[in-house]
Image (cartoon, helix red, strand yellow):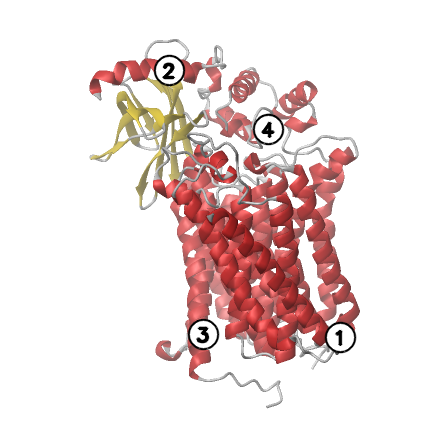
Amino acid sequence: MIAEAGLAALWLAAAMALLQFVGGLTLLRGGAGQLVPLIKPAAYVQGGLCAFAFFALMWLFYVTDLSVLLVASNSHIDKPMIFKLAGTWGNHEGSMLLWVAVLSVSGAAIAFFEKRIDAKTLYATLAVQGFIALGFFAFLLFASNPFERLVPAPLEGAGLNPLLQDVGLAFHPPTLYMGYVGLSIAFSFAVGALLTNQVGPAFARAMRPWVLTAWIFLTIGIAAGSYWAYYELGWGGWWFWDPVENASLMPWLAATALLHSVSVLATRNALRAWTIMLALVAFAMSMAGTFLVRSGILTSVHAFAVDPERGAFILALMLIYTSIAFVIFALRIGTVKQGEPFQLVSREGGIVANNIFLSVILAIVLIGTLYPLAAEAMGDKISVGPPYFNKATVPVMLLLMVALLIGPMLRWRRDALMRIKYWLIGAAAILVCGGLAAWKMAPDTRLFPLLGIALSLALAVAAWLPLRGRKLLRTPLPIFGMVIAHFGIAVSVFGMAEESGFSKETLTALAPGESAEIAGWKVKLDDVKPVLGDNWVAVEGEMVASKNGDTFILRPQSRQFFKPEMQTSEAALLTRWNGQLYAVIAQPDQEGDGRWQVRLWWKPYVTFIWYGGILIALGGTISLFGRMFRRAKKPAINKWERA
Amino acid sequence: MRAFAPILLALSVPVFAQGSGPTPPLANRQLADPAQEAQAMRLMHSLRCIQCQGQSIADSDAAMAGTMRAEVRQQIAAGQKPQAIRSWMIDRYGEWVSFEPDMKGVGLLLWVAPFFIFVASIWLARGLFRRRT
């Protein structure tokens, strides 16, 4: 009954989306607009129905209703409750339902809260939003119905991929989806503003919170996903340039560029066409990401989502939306007036540099991800992996950091480098000293980690300089947000450079009582014993790690899951302020002499990678709240707009 | 619980050993010379485990990856150059095995593209600054 109610709600919601779309369309085509009063209520009802459908599915997972196909094939009666609930979106149909639910609820939120932009632009935006939703409703209802019944119902259910049975799962996919959906709203705003000829600061200010929110969620989602892969896969890697990782990185890169250019449009009324373009690209990248993940077209670690037919459906949606959007862009961009001028050495110039470097990185990642497909179509089966992506993108990332050392110090419109000459000299000094110090400590380190360390040290100082000469209590919160986010970049890059340049590794086999050494740590395997979990058995090693008189106990496990059958390594991590000790126990060694394969890593400052990610997201959040607070206090007055 | 311990351990061991056969010793051991090991490690990170889903042989528990790691370490220890080992792997498993496409043939465009994109985007952005105030 619940399942049928959920399905009915989805059909009704699709009808609401259609109403929203048609209503907006008639208004834009200069019709009488009888449907216009219905657009906002349609958005509210659509949001409510989709939320209901999502919670209905969650309820079915909560009670483990095995007569529903999706529950039967992805859940199991013996699974811990948290994973039963998280299983709602740990599969194709459920995750698409989540996508649509977030999209619809956001649409309702725009309809309710957005008061700053022209009414016609708002209706156009909601119409675009309805149009996007329609495509995804069609996809859900025709190609991936989450409420399908299974007759007869099985007794216990098939279970969930053990790699997904982790708290990471409860947070990782939903946060990424929030990001993707947020970018769809930026897209709707951009198309709406293009259609009604309202590309200006007011539109930019209306769009900005959605871009910022999407970007915060993407940042958290990527950082969480990276940490999850790091401890779950058991080999100490935190970024694999896997197609699915790239699929989340590309929208993030586009969103980061968009976030900066939309600020220029909001405060300086420049970069108009470019901002619209980035908004379209950002959503195209979200769609491409969904397509790559959901179709399984690229062989990847995440290929548990493989389904080529559905892939074709999403590909069609992606092509329809992006091509329509770019046609509108091409037709209307002539009507977008040129923005305010600026010079190369200016804050705008710095942001243009940011946009260029981010776009170049985005293009490289996109080409590298799709290249094997193109090559395969022409008869060559090649792989493009970490060595390529590192060599091609890291130099541009380092350039981006150089731009970040200078850009935020410059004034709007025009400035002179001479004005900030002391800082330039200081930055050069930090770069040289930092690089030399790191090189002195480890002469055989490669170039990229050295440059990464030097630049992150300089940026760790540079990030705070925009606060210089300001009264801290009167400084707007978004400035603090920017400073913290930029500092987060420095922290994160420092961690990445340290980890990739200075990690230590020990691979060995130990019998209980034997010990190994790594980076000054002595790790003794005390005992190996079996452990029984809810739906797995494991071999657990008890290791005693000691250094300078401190001792710690580590308990890595090698788990064997039953439903479905699969083996995973549960690494044990010992976190110190300056790094992590990463211990894995694997199989018994082949000689059958009671020794176990043990892998140990010392990863200096590796945690900084994710602390940096948290700081970046925190900076975004402070900026978001700062703007909401300021908006509530006084309406922004901009001298480029007529009152 | 403790009483069952030996049974559980006995139960789990055959599962772990399943299908892996005798693993060569160098699959899960480092080379004695750190410089050689670093060289081998860099190469292993650039070779795809063809049995897995997009992982390199340096990050995989699969038996196949272990065999390939052992092969890489043996050849490095025997004084082979990494590039020669890569070619050897490509001869055996096809270009699919290398995560780093060659700078010739199909792969050439891939390596040229970043430079092209970089120059093109700078050229495009140039127009933004032309206007003087």
Look at the image and tell me in which quarter the C terminus of chain B lies.
bottom right
**Subunit of label 4:** B
Q: Is residue A211 above or below residue B97?
A: below
- Residue A117: percent from the left, percent from the top? 59, 78
Distance from Cα at disc 4 to Cα at disc 3: 48 Å
Q: Are marks 3 and 2 in contact (CB under 8 Å)?
A: no
Disc 2 and disc 1 on one polypeptide chain: no
Which mark lies nearer to you, 2 or 4?
2
Point out the tag, 2 or 4, that comes first from the N-terminus.
2
Residue that mark 3 sits on: A628
- Mark before the other along the chain sequence, 1 or 3: 1
Is residue A113 visible to the viewer in this orientation of the structure? yes
Q: Which residue is mark 2?
A: B13
How far apart marks 3 and 2 lie (CA) works out to 58 Å
Circles 2 and 4: CB atoms closer than 8 Å: no
What distance separates the C-alpha of mark 1 from that of mark 3?
34 Å
Across and down, in percent, residue A197 comes to 71, 77
Q: Nearer the viewer, mark 4 or mark 1?
A: 1
Which amino acid is tagged 1?
Answer: Arg
Picture coordinates of residue A599, whole percent (x, y): 39, 26
Which numbered marker is on residue B48? 4
> Mark 1 vs mark 3: same chain?
yes
Marks 4 & 3, CB-CB < 8 Å contact: no
Q: Tell me: residue A640, above or below residue A227.
A: below
Quadrant of the rendered image containing residue A529: top left
Q: Residue at x 51, y 41 (%)?
A: A91
Mark 3 Cα shell of 10 Å, populated few (<14), some (14-19), many (≥20): few
Please indicate whether residue A512 sits to the left or right of residue A270 in the image. left
In the displayed structure, A395 sits above or below A476; it is above
| Residue bearing mark 1 | A29
Q: Chain ID for label 1?
A: A
Q: Nearer the viewer, residue B22 or A353?
A: B22
